[in-house]
Image (tube, rainbow, N blue to C red):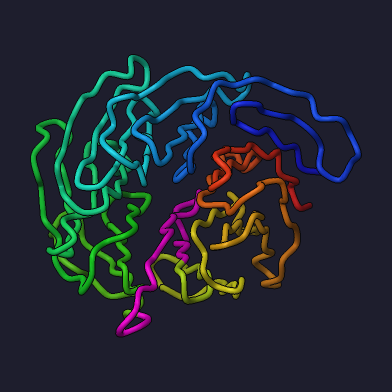
Amino acid sequence: MATIVTVSTMACLWHSGRAAEPKPVFLDTRKEVVTTVQFSPDGKTLAVAGSGDAVKLWEVESRKEIGLLPDTTGRVGSVAFSPDGKRLATGGTGIVQVWSVATQAELLNLKPGGGGRCAFSPKGNVLATSGPFTEKTAILWDLESGKQQAVLKGHDTYVTALAFSADGKLLFTGSRDGCIKIWSVEAGKVQQTLREKLLKDSASPVTTLLVSADGKALLASTWDSPVTLWEIGTWKEVAKIDCYKSVESAALSPDKKRIYTARMNSRDVEVWDVATGKKSLTLSGHTSYVRAISLSTDGKTLASGGYDGTARLWTVPSGE
């Protein structure tokens, strides 16, 4: 049984599958498209960003707003917590900002250009961002100095997704044409191309790159190919989920047994069994299309956000 919490102007808590009256919880949230949601590493805080210029921080247990980052510039399409949960990076068009979670003070204002995709290294001392649209690069930033450490060149189109390996030695990047590359962080060079571009003349962006909780697998989703799970190192395909394509966002359970997807033009979050490749559960509740999802580190809570202007928290079943 999945428990749903809606973060909106009026939020409700109920149990799916039962004819129970909603229990209203009033939360003061703007009505706009939710473009990204992200849990802090300890799962206690949820960052919610939308088509406006503010990012809100929510305490997951109490469902109360505990922070507001009001000075983000333009539409925020990417947020990332530092490994210790003390900083939050927010990315909009052309700008990436780094904030103190405790004080909501801006610590750094970077101008990498591009779509503002961002990811912290495991030690939290390096931030990877997408580069300018025209230059088709990823950039590594030294967070102590705020200066560029390396510019990674090799994609044919601009970068749409980023993730570090668990040891921080590798950076995975995905681009608008579906290509996925593996970089040496130390050398600043491509080690290999994990997947070539999918389509020659149209967009099939990599929408998710995510390293599993044990650091041994890489999950990738795009618009025009199955969601794929690779074993890091051997690069053997562990799973390939053909979930009707057009995946906007994906998440992986800590035990790597379940994959969660939000698809373009769908109001549902779908849960897939990795072993069988089949759908095992559908989480319904959004009144418009789901844009983004995030799974807490312990795998017990899923956040989703979408075009209905709400973010929702789901207590997901273990699948056992």
Q: Residue at x 71, y 72 (%)?
A: 276
* Residue bounds of the magenta highlight: 198-221
Q: Could you tell me residue 91's position as x and y percent?
A: 29, 42
Q: Could you tell me residue 44's position as x and y percent?
A: 54, 26
Viewed as shown, does residue 1 lie left or right of 220? right
Viewed as shown, does residue 287 lie left or right of 251? right
Please identify the residue farthest to the right as the structure is shown: 19
Please identify the residue farthest to the top as the structure is shown: 103
Q: Nearer the viewer, residue 290 or 216?
A: 290
Q: Residue at x 19, y 60 (%)?
A: 133
Q: Could you tell me residue 189's position as x and y percent?
A: 15, 65
Q: Residue at x 64, y 66 (%)?
A: 274
Viewed as shown, does residue 41 lie left or right of 144? right
Q: Is residue 220 magenta?
A: yes
**Residue 208 higher or lower than 234, as above or below:** above
Q: Nearer the viewer, residue 2 or 92?
A: 92
Q: Could you tell me residue 222's position as x and y percent?
A: 45, 68
Q: Is residue 302 magenta?
A: no
Q: Specify the quadrant that holds the N terminus.
A: top right
Viewed as shown, does residue 258 lie left or right of 223? right
